[in-house]
Image (cartoon, rainbow, N blue to C red):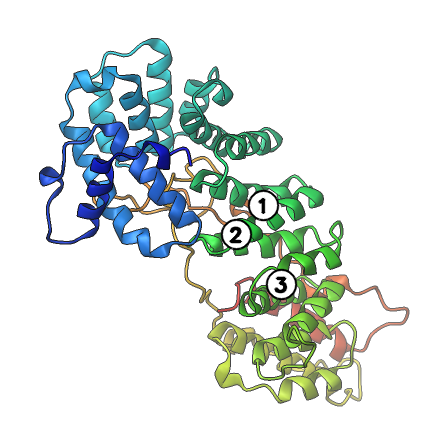
Amino acid sequence: MRLAATLSGAALIALLVAGVPGRATASEAPALEPYQLVRCLQLLQDRIASGDQASLPLQRRLLEMTDERMRSADVAAFKDPKNFRALLIYAMSGGNPLTIEQVVSRLTLEEADQKLAQGVIDYLRGKPKGTVEALASIDPLTQISELGAFLALVKGSVSIAEQPEQAMKLFDQARLLSPGTLVEEAALRRSVALASRVDDGGRFLRNSTQYVRNYLRSPYASQFADAFVAGVVALHSSINLDTLAEITAAMDAEQEQVVYLRIARRAAIDGLTELSVFASAKAEKGRDGTLDSADPRAQLYSGLSSVTSGTAADMLGKLGGIDRDKLSKGDRALLDAVEAVASELTSAVPAAPASAPKPVDIEDLPPAPLEIAPPAVDPMIPDAAEAPSPVPSAPVQSAAPAAPAAPATPAEQPAVAAAPRVVPLTQQQPEPAEPEDPKITEARRTLESIDELLGGSPK
């Protein structure tokens, strides 16, 4: 709404030209002001956030056009506040940091504008401390809504590590200033991930509900799913499972099943029997309540959840019917390991306690690499200041649609890039009243070793 009313006919032509390969180059397109191109870019990204994935290639072309226009614009053009603000918004919308630095170096700016520009550049360059210092005195609510929303998102991102509560408030400001946009979509994703870190189950459920209602068709919804699964596992003791079911009911049937499969796997690995049983049952049953035994993953996670509640023989019986050819490598390794432990538990007890059983050699098991593809990179801004992670985001040149370089930091990871600690299954079991025989003791040790193979999401 805020953009559509201001789009000129020339801007619409620019969008069409950028979207048709071979028709024209950026230099041949109508000469638009920088702020006009950036408004087009914002409109396009808002459409993408709403689910228009066909606009992704067009976003790339429009970023190229905008980058060239920013580089070629006269210094005098940026004396217009609209064009200077557009430069900063472009930077936070996937723009090339080299272009931003080049343009800013040519400008004579007031102190406040210089701080704004330096804060944005430091953020793009992955310098959170510099970003905090430069933007410390800038209140996003005092800026025009388009710029203020981005600044709130940036300030919130650099506050996550040291001031998570403040970061949550800034994400709320971003959503307030820019509803229905890619800024709100990104702020909601970050808020869902951050809620588990601040142990706020109520906010986690509210923000998850809003995301599912408005942005489930976004190309970045897979990042939300990562944060949602991690949050459910981390907050399982403080959230209502009936409310969880209401949220997933707004997804389509396939999305809902995949989410429950992932929750069941994580919960089973962490020894959260109640949550694992709940999620496994949801994954196995369709929305009509009919049991679906076709998915071997649901059978595996359901069987794994019975480690602490059923007998080894029951577990072997359930796992024996799984079609292992339909499992990922990681889940086949999990199946092999659990079957090996169950077989040890059901074998004959040795005649003398001193005769120790031969342990399962965990080195002989196939590796369990993470097979899920990394989520799409958020093209709006890099998560340069979020919690540390070993997965860096790749630098992007001016012709690319993704966010500019963010050294040694990821696009959003589940639960703000901090995966919940893996708790061995056996730690959830109470100490037995009587001494255990060596066979069971050794099996428990093997289970702890199996945990080292786990931790990935199913494919």
Q: What element carries label 3?
A: helix
Q: Is residue 437 left or right of residue 301?
A: right
Say how many tags the image has.
3
Q: Is residue 125 left or right of residue 177?
A: left
Q: Farthest residue toward the top?
A: 110
Q: In this view, does 154 lie above or below 455?
A: above
The residue lying at 76 percent from left, 90 percent from top is 348
Residue of label 2: 224
The residue lying at 74 percent from left, 82 percent from top is 312
Calculate the distance from the C-alpha at mark 2 to the C-alpha at mark 3: 14 Å
Calculate the distance from the C-alpha at mark 2 to the C-alpha at mark 1: 8 Å
Tag 2: residue type?
Phe
| Nearest the eye: 412 or 206 | 206
At label 2, counting other C-alpha atoms closer than 10 Å, the crowd grade (few under 14, some 14-19, many 20 or more) is many
For the question of whether residue 25 can be seen, the reply is yes
Quarter the N terminus occupies? top left
| Nearest the eye: 368 or 73 | 73
Q: In this view, does 84 lie above or below 458?
A: above
Determine whether label 2 and label 1 are within 8 Å by CB. yes
| Nearest the eye: 145 or 228 | 145
At label 3, counting other C-alpha atoms closer than 10 Å, the crowd grade (few under 14, some 14-19, many 20 or more) is many
Give the mark nearest the N terminus, 3 or 1: 1
At label 1, counting other C-alpha atoms closer than 10 Å, the crowd grade (few under 14, some 14-19, many 20 or more) is many
Q: Residue 192 carries which label?
A: 1
Q: What element carries label 1?
A: helix
Image spot of residue 365 (x, y percent): 52, 77
Residue of label 3: 263
